Image (cartoon, grey):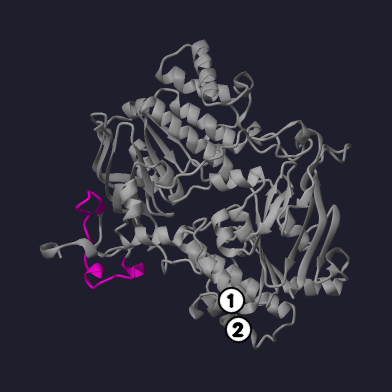
Amino acid sequence: MNEMLLEVNHLQTHFYTENGVVKAVNDVSFAIREGETVCIVGESGCGKSITALSLMQLIPENGKVEAGEIHFAGQDLLRLSKKDIRRLRGNEIGMIFQEPMTSLNPVFTIGEQMIEPLQEHLLLSKKDAYKKAMALITMLGIPNAEKIVNLYPHELSGGMLQRIMIAIALSCNPKLIIADEPTTALDVTIQAQILDMLREIKQEFNTSILLITHDLGVVAEMADYVVVMYAGKVVEEGPVLELFANPQHPYTKGLLKAKPVIGERKDRLYTIAGQVPNLVDLQEACYFADRCEHAMDICRMKQPALTTMANGQKAACWLYEEGENR
Amino acid sequence: MSETLLEVTDLKKYYSSSKGMFKKFGDAVKAVDGVSFTIEKGEVFGLVGESGSGKSTIGKTILRLHDKTDGEVKYKGKDVFSLSKKELRHLRVETQLVFQDPFSSLNPRIRVGDAIGEAMVEHGLVSKQEVRERVLEVMEKCGLSPFHIDRYPHEFSGGQRQRIVIARAMALNPEFIVMDEPVAALDVSIQAQIINLFSDLQRENGLSYLFISHDLSVVEHLCTKIAIMYLGNIVEQASKEELFKNPMHPYTKALLSAVPIPDPTAKRERIILKGDIPSPINPPSGCKFRTRCPMATDLCAEKIPDYHDAGGGHFVACHYV
């Protein structure tokens, strides 16, 4: 088996707002091996993006990583100095965001933005950096590299910009790429191109990918391992085949049933009643209890822990807890 | 026998991109470039396309929210663009719109109950005394609780706001609703609730919808007839069953193969289209899809393909079908 690249243990990220403390990431643990794609899936506000931003320590000012460990290639990221973290970002860890339009600086050309990390991290000369940028663009199958490096972001389409973002993320040969909803803002046919590109990169360079998405279709196509989040917590995780074939947590089951699928006609869609709880005043309980059709008394009193099943899948649900824990 | 509710013939809508003070008209953006379709009473018509295909422009033009460039739109046999003021007011009651973004569709300073009831009073459908009762009735139908009536929009989540917008549209007892990406901004679990609400309202009230979406799985679930758009034209149109069983246009095939399926064991042939959607200011000659089409030939660059019936009401615009 491949070596462990990233290990996140009991991560807690809190936001301090006027209304109280929001536990955006509440005791989250997961791991990524070399060459593995891990998908974090969940709906808006479940903490999936903040988990990714916590890894890079890019969380907004009113937030703070309160506890936990993030081991990346032998070092604890939370103990690194600001300078050392800067050396990692864009170098060993590349990042792609949802909106390619706002991720690039509008007043610099594509070329200028591409050579910056190359000069900064790989210490290339300007000329070599330009050459490498050109090579990256060509490698990603974008025609007219010489022309594109001189264009400004507004002159390119969303799909093209996202490809440039991927090129920038790849430029320093990162070990890990964090992609936060990389195709959500794109059309389906362009999404297919970008996902295809990410798969090729993974195969060619053995890069690990942490993919954040809300789309179970994307998860099924990309992931080796899936982590399902709800209200700041991991509610279920497992290898992709097992998780889709045999979802355990009622939330995962509900998500899979609620999504209309082409070729599967149903009279009515399955719905999960109610809505996501307010993260400010959460009581000790299973956070999904109010929306769960299997909710029992214990669900409203005590939080279930993530329990490992026989096949290695994990779920945090009282339905699967045995004996004394209860 | 079904009854035709809306008939659109060769509709065109160009936006002129103005270029400075003196040169008034620059190159026209051909947002909708000759589109024809009909919607029967009680039908849910799906209009699918990627960004810039002109699907939203169609929705707004057929309700006369802005002018057409050419073509004809008939609602219940009457030309929408030559209605008298009084008739137009009547059209505004019978037809309604629901937009994608429930956050910008509601005035933040108007209470939910007033937002839903305002149009009813304005159009004289109910008296001021009855309005509250009627608003509560509609709210209940749309899954809102009575205590929501005096709240402001910011107190609601996205899914609930979309319910408010739907309630506002339903308040006038419309016959025809244009839905422009109404669930695109919602999470999966909420999306399912709203889609079910659409089906219920449609069935109970015999409504017709023009359902505009980029999401083929939602369209398949909800619609009876589907049209696929590319760069201002409909390239294919058929009943739902026929379109998903037997897609004919290369673009439809590619679109269908690009939708990610939530099943990691699914094996299928993926058609990955090359390149981006061309600019509607300067679309390719002949067939507009030819620059990305895996089967394009010289003929496709020379001649615009006919939009023809390939059998049994399955319309398609391609030289090789």
Which amino acid type is marked by label 1?
Gly
- Give the tally of numbered discs: 2
Please state, as top left, top right, bottom left or bottom right, where the N terminus of chain A lies in the image: top left
Is residue B72 or residue A311 the one in the foreground? A311
Residue A306 higher or lower than B16, as above or below: below
Q: Residue at x 68, y 78 (%)?
A: B173
Q: Residue furthest left?
A: A324
Residue B121 spot, x, y in % from top left? 70, 80
Residue B306 spot, x, y in % from top left? 80, 46
Q: Are marks 2 and 1 on the same chain?
A: yes
Location of residue B204 (image quadrant): bottom right
Q: Residue at x 70, y 39 (%)?
A: B289
Q: Residues within 10 Å of mark 1 (few under 14, many from 20)?
A: many
Per the rendering, the mark at residue B113 is 1
Residue segment shown in magenta: A289-314
Please give the residue where the numbered disc 2 appears in the rendered image: B132
Q: Is residue A47 left or right of residue B231?
A: left
Could you tell me how far apart the alpha carbons at marks 2 and 1 are, in whole angstroms?
7 Å
Mark 2 touches mark 1? (CB < 8 Å): yes
Residue A93 higher or lower than B73, as above or below: above
Is residue B242 or residue A49 the one in the foreground? B242
Residue B60 spot, x, y in % from top left? 73, 59
Which amino acid type is marked by label 2?
Arg
Residue A31 lies in the magenta-colored region: no
